[in-house]
Amino acid sequence: MEQRIKNIGNNSIKVKKDFLDNDLIITSIKSIIEVITIAFKQKSRVYFCGNGGSAADAQHLAAEFSGRFYLDRTPLPSEALHCNSSFLTAVANDYGYDNVYSRLLKGIGNKGDILVGISTSGNSQNIINAFQYANEIGMTTVSFTGEDGGKMASLSKIAIKVPSNDTPRIQESHILIGHIICEIVETNLFT
């Protein structure tokens, strides 16, 4: 069991090292930092969405902006789209689960806002539908996916494709990438 524990940890480290050694991913992270910094300076909002563990990551990262990361500072306008369970269940019941995020964006999304979709496969239909709507109205779309990128990558202005097909290792990298973005955006805005 000890060796299995070490193997899991080493696999996680390897995926992180692989994305850190990938110039395209680093360039994409820098681009995301820039667009989010500009959006917040212009009083635009950053929305996050995902399903399952990726919904938890979406909520976590939104809270880093709307609450705080390292600095005691003004809250930034950011939220995870799945947090209103009454809305989510009503729309899923009335319009289908594939429409929960796009429907909410139709009510609150604006040109200049950013939508970050998190999906290890990149093929979550509810996020794809939200990206299509967001692109129509001039939002910036950002995807965090696995190696393949799925359909989301082609709909994204900026795509982060973690070089792995292993869902837990992808999710671990997504949260690290998200924390890197949150830390540097916060520093850009408040120091």
Image (spheres, rainbow, N blue to C red):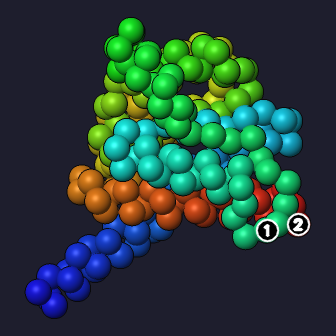
Callout 2 secondary element: loop
Q: Residue at x 44, y 50 (%)?
A: 56
Per the image, the residue denoted by label 1 is 71
| Extreme residue toward the left, this view | 1
Per the image, the residue denoted by label 2 is 191
| Extreme residue toward the bottom, this view | 2
User: Between disc 2 and disc 1, whose residue precedes?
Assistant: 1
Q: Residue at x 43, y 39 (%)?
A: 50
Q: Is residue 113 left or right of residue 119?
A: right
In the rendered structure, find residue 93 and report the number of the disc placed on it: none
Identify the amino acid type marked 2. Answer: Thr
Question: Would you identify the image quadrant in which residue 55 lies?
Answer: top left
Q: How far across and down, in percent of the image, does residue 67 sit? A: 71, 55
Q: How far across and down, in percent of the image, does residue 129 sit? A: 44, 19
Identify the amino acid type marked 1. Answer: Leu
> In this rendering, is residue 188 above or below 107?
below
Q: How far across and down, in percent of the image, does residue 11 sit? A: 26, 73
> In this rendering, is residue 101 above or below 35?
above
* Foreground of the two, 136 or 79: 79
Q: Is residue 46 visible?
A: yes
Q: Quadrant of the N terminus?
A: bottom left
* Foreground of the two, 62 or 83: 83
Q: Residue at x 58, y 62 (%)?
A: 179
Instruction: Tell me how far mark 2 sits from mark 1, CA to CA.
Output: 9 Å
Q: Is residue 182 left or right of residue 26?
A: right
Q: Residue at x 54, y 54 (%)?
A: 60
